[in-house]
Image (cartoon, rainbow, N blue to C red):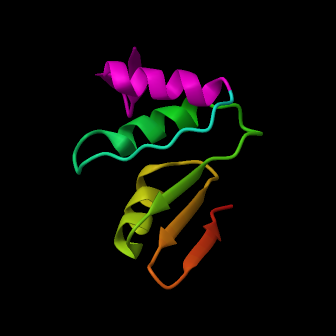
């Protein structure tokens, strides 16, 4: 599946395409993958494809990742930083 970001055409992997199709069809999806595997790219594509009335919850393990995600993804979504002691929820409006 091809996806365009800032005028650049990106070929999504088979796994990213399955993730997108499952999420768009209303399935809950958990993505747990290593650094650099394309998680943020897949979520960016999902935000472009997902109906605007749907919500996306993006869990991160550090505030730095939360800030990075918010800077890259241009839509309303929840970003959660999960720490051992607590969970902080913040909505981008």
Nearest to the observer: residue 51 or residue 13 = 13
Q: How many marks?
A: 0
Residue 69 % position (x, y): 43, 57
Nearest to the observer: residue 78 or residue 84 = 84
Q: Is residue 34 above or below residue 60?
A: above
Name the image quarter holding residue 12. Answer: top left
In the image, 79: left or right of 83?
A: right
Q: Is residue 31 above or below residue 24?
A: below
Q: Is residue 49 above or below residue 33?
A: above
Residue 11 % position (x, y): 30, 19
Residue most extreme to the front: 84
Residue most extreme to the top: 1
Q: Is residue 16 magenta?
A: yes
Please provide the residue range marked out in magenta: 1-25
Residue 46 % position (x, y): 53, 34
Q: Is residue 91 above or below residue 57?
A: below
In the image, 50: left or right of 30?
A: right
Image quarter where the C terminus lies is bottom right
| Residue drawn at the location 46% of the way across and 40% of the way down | 44
| Residue drawn at the location 73% of the way across and 40% of the way down | 54
| Residue drawn at the location 45% of the way across and 78% of the way down | 83
| Residue drawn at the location 31% of the way across and 45% of the way down | 33
Q: Is residue 14 magenta?
A: yes
Nearest to the observer: residue 6 or residue 31 = 31
Residue most extreme to the bottom: 85
Image quarter where the N terminus lies is top left
Residue 21 % position (x, y): 54, 21
């Amino acid at each position: 599946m091809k996806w365009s970001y800032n005028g650049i055409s990106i070929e999504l992997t088979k796994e990213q395409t399955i993730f997108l199709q499952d999420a768009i069809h209303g399935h809950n999806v958990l993505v747990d993958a290593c650094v650099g595997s394309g998680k943020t790219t897949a979520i960016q594509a999902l935000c472009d494809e997902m109906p605007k009335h749907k919500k996306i919850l993006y869990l991160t393990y550090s505030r730095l990742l939360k800030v990075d995600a918010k800077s890259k993804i241009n839509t309303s979504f929840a970003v959660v930083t999960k720490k051992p002691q607590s969970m902080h929820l913040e909505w981008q409006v």
